[in-house]
Image (cartoon, rainbow, N blue to C red):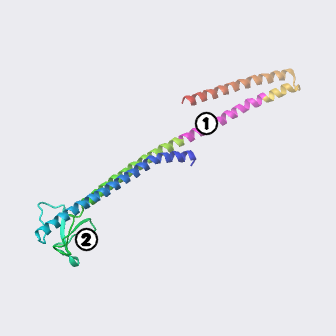
């Protein structure tokens, strides 16, 4: 790979790479922001439930109407639970202590269901990120393919031009050699007048051939320039 080709590919790869990194940074920041919002929501629900329990001095959770977005539970000392325990699957929780009214007890809140909103949102953002990666990769591959085709076409054109030059060079050498030999014979003085006339005719004929070849070369150059 030549240096020019390498820098061309690098220039093609730079925009997709920058766009991918920017998308990753934005999505990572948005994911972290969503996680913080979710934690703040759960903590607010735990604080509200704990405040209600401390106010009523009743060690039971307040009831909610409709399908809740979250699950509340009371953790007792010794790793016990009052009521059903929360799922132990590492999901985000909000925790609020119930002391001094109920020492060692705490209210814990987590998302309801098997897929919490934070995880679902993170998965959606991941799909967006992968889509951006796919688009960038497709754009780079298409640009690289176009560049490769252009380089192949340029190489093919250069080989054709080199072949044409070799053909014209060979065609030029033949009349030049004939003209040179005839001129040397005519100048040597070792041939008669008839042979000198024949050499002169040969020189004129070969000169015409040269003129035709030069005309063809100029015509070819003109087509190449216009094309």
Name, please, the residue furthest toward the bottom.
78
Along the horizontal axis of the image, is 181 left or right of 108?
Answer: right
Q: Which image quarter: residue 218?
A: top right
Q: Residue at x 66, y 35 (%)?
A: 167
Q: Which image quarter: residue 175?
A: top right
- Disc 1 crowd rating (10 Å Cα; few below 14, some 14-19, many 20+) is few
Q: Is residue 175 magenta?
A: yes
Give the CA separation, mark 1 to mark 2. 75 Å
x, y percent for residue 88: 25, 71
Q: Is residue 114 magenta?
A: no
Q: Residue at x 57, y 30 (%)?
A: 225
Quadrant of the drawing holding the C terminus? top right
Q: Residue at x 23, y 77 (%)?
A: 79
Tag 1 near tag 2, CB within 8 Å? no
Q: Main secondary structure of the magenta part?
A: helix
Q: Which image quarter: residue 157?
A: top right
At mark 1, the secondary structure is: helix
Q: Which mark is residue 88?
A: 2
Q: Residue at x 76, y 31 (%)?
A: 177
The residue that label 1 is drawn on is 161
Q: Earlier in the sequence, mark 1 or mark 2?
A: 2
Region rendered in magenta: 153-179
Along the horizontal axis of the image, is 92 left or right of 25?
Answer: left
Q: Which mark is residue 91?
A: none
Q: Camera-side residue: 208 or 146?
A: 146
Q: Is residue 123 visible?
A: no
x, y percent for residue 11: 49, 45
Q: Camera-side residue: 57 or 114?
A: 57
């Amino acid at each position: 790979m030549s240096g020019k080709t390498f820098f061309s590919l690098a220039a093609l790869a730079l925009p997709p790479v920058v766009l991918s990194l920017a998308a990753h940074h934005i999505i990572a920041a948005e994911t972290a922001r969503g996680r913080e919002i979710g934690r703040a929501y759960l903590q607010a629900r735990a604080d509200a439930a704990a405040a209600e329990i401390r106010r009523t001095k009743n060690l039971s959770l307040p009831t909610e109407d409709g399908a809740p977005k979250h699950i509340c539970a009371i953790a007792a000392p010794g790793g016990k639970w009052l009521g059903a325990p929360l799922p132990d699957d590492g999901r985000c929780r909000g925790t609020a202590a119930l002391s001094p009214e109920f020492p060692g007890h705490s209210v814990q809140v987590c998302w309801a269901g098997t897929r919490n909103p934070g995880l679902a949102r993170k998965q959606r953002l991941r799909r967006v990120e992968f889509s951006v990666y796919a688009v960038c990769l497709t754009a780079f591959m298409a640009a690289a393919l176009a560049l490769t085709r252009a380089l192949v076409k340029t190489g093919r054109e250069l080989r054709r031009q080199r072949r044409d030059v070799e053909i014209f060079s060979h065609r030029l050498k033949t009349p030049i050699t004939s003209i040179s030999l005839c001129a040397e014979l005519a100048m040597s003085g070792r041939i008669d007048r008839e042979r000198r006339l024949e050499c002169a005719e040969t020189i004129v004929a070969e000169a015409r051939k040269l003129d035709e070849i030069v005309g063809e070369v100029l015509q070819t150059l003109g087509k190449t320039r216009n094309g």
